[in-house]
Every structure is written in structure tokens, then in C-alpha cells.
Amino acid sequence: MSQENQGAVRSNIRVVLFGLMIALMLAMLDNMIVSTALPRITLEFGGADHFTWIVTAYILGTTVSTPIWGKLGDLYGRKKVFLTSVVLFLVGSALCGMSGSDLLGGADNGMIQLIAFRAVQGLGAGGLMVGVMAIIGDLVPPRERARYQGLIAGIMATAMVAGPLVGGFITDNLSWRWAFYVNLPLGGIALFVLATTMRLPKYRTEHRIDWLGTALLSVGITAVVLVTTWGGNSHDWTSPQILGLAVLAVVALVAFGLVERRAPEPILPLGLFANRNFALISVIGFLLGFAMFGAMNFLPLYQQTVQGASATNSGLLLLPMMFGMLVVSPAVGRAITRTGRYRAYPIVGGVVMAAGVALLTRLDLDTSKTESSLYMIVLGIGMGFLMQTSMLIAQNSVAQKDLGAASGAATFFRSIGGSIGVSLFGAIFANRIADSPAGSAFGGGTGEGRNMDLEKLRQLPPQLRETVLGGLADAVSHVFVWAVFLTVAVPVLAWFIREIPLRSTNDAPPDATGEEQAEVALGKPSAA
């Protein structure tokens, strides 16, 4: 990028960042807001046996589309591709809010319409998340990038807590439809700001869409998400449906790997994984998703049942974990920007996160809210060390022309880790509780606590209620025992990360590897 272009980019970086943060907040908030509206939606449309698909369709659309949006940005330019994803998200939001209305044929097909439109919304959300990461990668050199990615981690943490609170307020005071309509004015502001102010550097790339690879990846990811969503919940793990989907996932992903090796412009360049740092940080991102989304799923369950918190207050009780992330993420970002060094942070973060998960294994019937809050602070601090550094290392490991693909892959592995983590932890939870006195409160111990009848728990005699809640607390702590075995691998893997100096500019040749770009920053001759 020329000096003139660099000056133009820096002059409006804050305005562009404002638009990007709104877009990211929309993608992160939406699923959290909608979760609180699900009971009202089910009451209006019926189809309680399908209501989980309102969440699953969004997750599926997001996960499938993330690597595809990243590659499209590399091919056709990130600005136009990102704005397209914003428009698609807003169209999906509007259609979701209109589901079951007279304009679309009434409430008879409302649930089916909402599920379909949630998938459309999820497709757009996948582009929002990967687009923000990749655009910051284009605008800001790696040396300064950590500071901005620390802000992104803060936005994500804020959304996780604010989502249920905002969703509860909207559902109680307006209508569940406004859980979707609220995206329109905010998204419109982001669209206007970014369309009029965002100027990105352009890199010459041959335009060839890997359609076969795209189709195989979509089928494979869809099968994986369905296996982890349905397994142990809607269907037994050994049922023909789950085993068939598992076989389909393996076949599709193996075929995808074979196709990508020969594709002239692969949707997910497998050569990226030959880079040690990129391969390691992809696995770390997967494990981070496991821990983060697992905690987010089971801690509210523990708080609402064992600790007796309301749904809204359980969101507030997660604030200590988010506080840890909000304090540490920006501080780590500033430290990386100042020193240019990052290898120590994922190691420290992995150790602290594992310690936080280990502390959560101590949850029992007598654990106070203060004690559990201290445990969550430790977990949040560990995740704060990891959130932005994992994306920074992924981006610094690849050539500039592959920035979108790398950002998409990093986001994808974190999402897949979260999806699989929640599902597997749910199966562990269900198996643990099935034979306990709490099993009857869960409709036989199936699922992840979705069938928990809190009113029934309150009506139990005090002694029996205490026994049931003790079994529930034991099941939740048992989930974190298994999580410890996964999270201890994070600092071990992070130890093998090679510290490549962060560049102070984006001027390295666009086809250079991360190592070659580092040499350019250090004034060494490049082989590119």
C-alpha cells in the first residue's frame, strides 16, 4: 500500500471501526437475544418439537458460510463482499420478524418460515464475523492489530451478557418480532457508514470459484453440526440417523480434502495448515470454543436451578467472567502493540483458562454466588489472553492475499469447537444425571436441561428438592471435569508456537508467507 493510501486509511479508521463494531455486535447479539424470545415464539406458532431448529438453523448457516465468505473476500474484494453479507443479514432479520404474519400467509406456517429465514440470517452473520476480522487485517498492520482485536473481544463479551438482558426486555415490553426488527436500524447505520467511508487496499487475485469444494464443505459441515446438535438429544448417538450423518460427514470432508489439493483457487487452502503456527492456533481456537461455549451453556443452568437465580439475573451473574475478558483483552492488545511479542500470551491464557475450568469442578450445592463469581473471573481472564491473540497469530501466519481464508478458518474452528463442545458436554451431563435423583426433573435425563421444569422443582418437598439439586450440581461439575482434560492441552500446544515478528506495515509482497513478510519488516531480503 502506498504512503498516500496508508494516510487515507488511517484518517478514517475510527469511523470505519465504529461501523464494523456495530456489524459484529449484531451478529453476536442476535442469537443471545432470540434465545429469550423462544418461549413466546413457541406459544404463538406451536411446534415445540421444532423450536430448537430456530437456533440450529442460525448456527448452521453461520458455520457453513464462514470459510466461504472469507475466501470470497480474498477473490472479489472485502468491501463489496462484506456489504453483501450485511444486506443478507438485514433481509433475513426482516423476514424473520415477518414470519407467520398475514403478509406471509398467517401463523400456520410460521415456524417453518422462521426456521428458513433464520438460516438466511445465519448465512449473512457468517460474513459479518469473518469480514470484520479480515477488514481490520487489511486496514491495520499486525503490530497494531492486537489493540483493535482486543476491542473486538470486548464487544463479543459484552454481547454475550447484553443479549439475554436486551432480549428479555424486548420480549416483555414489545414483541418477539422486535428481537429481529431491532437489527434493521442498527444494521442500516453500519451499512451507510461502511459504504461511504471504508477504503481498503486491493490485491490482484485470479477469480475462480471452487464450486465443488464449496458444496462438499457445506455438506460436511452441515452433517457435523447436525450430529453434534441431534446426538444425545433428538436421537440416540447410535441411532441410524446419527451414524448415517457421521458417515456422510467423513465422506464429504475427505472428498473435500482431495478436491482442495487440486483446485486452482481452493475455498480453504490446505497449504495454510502446513504452517505450524496456523495449524496450532486452529486447534487452540477449537479448544477455546469448547471451553467458552460450554461454560456459557451450563453456568446459567446451574445458576437458575441450584442458586435460584431468574433467567435475567443468571445473565447478570455471568458478568464476572465477562469482566475478566473485558479487562484483559484490551490490556493484552496494547501490550502486543507496544512490544510486538505475543507468544507468551496464549501460554499464560491457556494455563489460567485451565485453572478456571478446574475451579468450576468445585461447584456444588453449597457454593456461594461470590465463590462461583471468583471462579468465573479466572476463566474470563484466561479467555481474555486467548481471544484476540489466536486470531492475530492466524493472520500473521499467512500471506496477505489469504487473509480472508485464514480469518474464516480461525472463526470456523472456534464455532465448530463451540458446537461440538456444547453437544458433547450435554451428552455427558445427561448421562451423569440420568441415574441421579434429579433425573425425573429432566424428563428422564435426556437433553441438556432443556426439559427442566423449574416450577416442578420449586414444588418438591425441601429435603427431596435439596437431593435433586445436589444431583444437578454434581452433573454440572462433572461436565467441567471433562473440560479440564481438553483445556490443559491449550498451553501445551501454545508452547510450540513460533514467535514471528509482527510487521509494522502491510507492505510485504501479497504472495509472501508470514515468515517472508516478517523478514520484510526486519529489513531482510525476501525470496518472494
Image (spheres, helix red, strand yellow):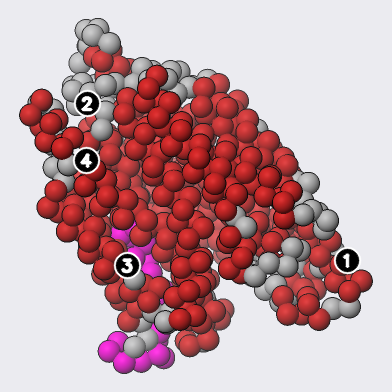
Estimate the spatial distance between the alpha carbons at disc 2 and disc 1, rounded to whole Å: 61 Å
Estimate the spatial distance between the alpha carbons at disc 4 and disc 1, rounded to whole Å: 57 Å
Estimate the spatial distance between the alpha carbons at disc 4 and disc 3, rounded to whole Å: 23 Å
| Residue picked out by circle 2 | 506
Hey, what amino acid is under mark 2? Asn
Secondary element at image label 4: helix
Could you tell me if residue 511 is visible in this image? no
Q: Earlier in the sequence, mark 4 or mark 3?
A: 4
Hey, what amino acid is under mark 1? Thr
Image quarter where the N terminus lies is top left
- Binning the other alpha carbons within 10 Å of mark 4 as few (below 14), some (14 to 19) or many (20 upward) gives some
- Binning the other alpha carbons within 10 Å of mark 3 as few (below 14), some (14 to 19) or many (20 upward) gives many
Number of the label disc, if any, that sits on residue 13: 4
Magenta stretch: includes residue 105:
yes
Secondary element at image label 3: helix
Whether pointer 4 and pointer 3 mark residues with C-beta atoms closer than 8 Å, the reply is no
Estimate the spatial distance between the alpha carbons at disc 2 and disc 4, rounded to whole Å: 15 Å
Q: Earlier in the sequence, mark 2 or mark 3?
A: 3
187 to the left or right of 173: left
| Residue at the outermost left position | 4
Estimate the spatial distance between the alpha carbons at disc 2 and disc 3, rounded to whole Å: 34 Å
Rendered residue at 52%/29% (across/down): 346
| Residue picked out by circle 1 | 467
